[in-house]
Image: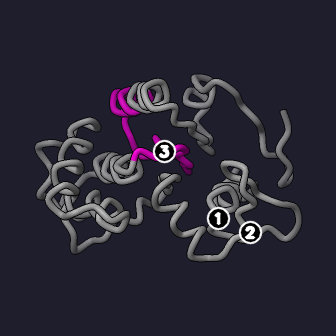
């Protein structure tokens, strides 16, 4: 349910928020025993984020929004542009690459956000309601894409969602009850 702490869980797992107690490990490292700069590098290169409210830059095109993390990871703009175009094609938006977020539907914005999360081929995708603004057809298409990425690249994904259809298609489900993860 709303207010259960799902978004907070994504923030903790991704090294965005510091836990009040306990530790968060990623690839064998305690995320909070390393410096902020190292956490930022891990977030950029090893973790992809898909937030419920997209967080797209309104003055950038879909292509530029997807390119940005690739450039920040040290890739040349021409390489980032080609990779972003390919990734947008994977999520069915090759015909919308020059559109800014304000000219895209909610579902298209979410697919741009998913493409942005995928561009650096992360080890883990952390997703907060990844299909929340998609119609059934596009939600199914994105789920197939995410499952293919998981299979091809060994990418793990963690989705926090109210969508039981999505949750039931994932390999493992946990519930968040009063701020506690239960099996």
Residue 101 visible from this viewpoint = no
The image quadrant of residue 4 is bottom right
Q: Is residue 102 above or below residue 174?
A: below
Callout 2: 10 Å neighbours few (<14), some, many (20+)?
Answer: some
Are discs 2 and 1 less than 8 Å apart at CB? yes
Secondary structure at numbered mark 1: loop
Query: Residue under circle 3?
Result: 130
Closer to the chain start, of discs 2 and 1, is 1
Closer to the chain start, of discs 3 and 1, is 1
Question: What are the residue bounds of the magenta stretch?
Answer: 121-143
Tag of residue 15: 1
Q: Residue at x 74, y 54 (%)?
A: 25
Tell me the CA gap for discs 2 and 1.
7 Å
- Residue 78 position, x and y percent, is 14, 59
Closer to the chain start, of discs 2 and 3, is 2
On screen, residue 43 versus residue 116, left or right, reads right
Q: Residue at x 56, y 76 (%)?
A: 37
Query: Residue under circle 2?
Result: 32
Q: Nearer the viewer, mark 2 or mark 3?
A: 2
On screen, residue 127 versus residue 65, left or right, reads right
The image quadrant of residue 140 is top left
């Amino acid at each position: 349910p709303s207010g259960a702490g799902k978004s907070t869980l994504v923030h903790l797992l991704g090294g965005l928020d510091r836990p009040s107690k306990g530790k968060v490990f990623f690839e064998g490292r305690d995320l909070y025993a390393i410096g902020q700069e190292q956490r930022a590098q891990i977030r950029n290169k090893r973790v992809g984020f898909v937030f419920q409210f997209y967080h797209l830059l309104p003055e950038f095109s879909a292509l530029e929004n997807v390119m940005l993390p690739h450039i920040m990871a040290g890739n040349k703009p021409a390489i980032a542009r080609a990779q972003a175009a390919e990734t947008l094609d994977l999520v069915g938006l090759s015909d919308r690459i020059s559109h800014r977020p304000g000219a895209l539907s909610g579902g298209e914005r979410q697919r741009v956000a998913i493409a942005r999360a995928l561009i650096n081929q992360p080890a883990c995708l952390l997703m907060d309601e990844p299909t929340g603004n998609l119609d059934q057809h596009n939600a199914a298409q994105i789920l197939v894409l995410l499952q293919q990425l998981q299979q091809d690249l060994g990418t793990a994904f963690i989705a926090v969602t109210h969508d039981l259809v999505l949750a039931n298609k994932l390999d493992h489900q946990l519930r968040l009850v009063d701020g506690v993860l239960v099996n």
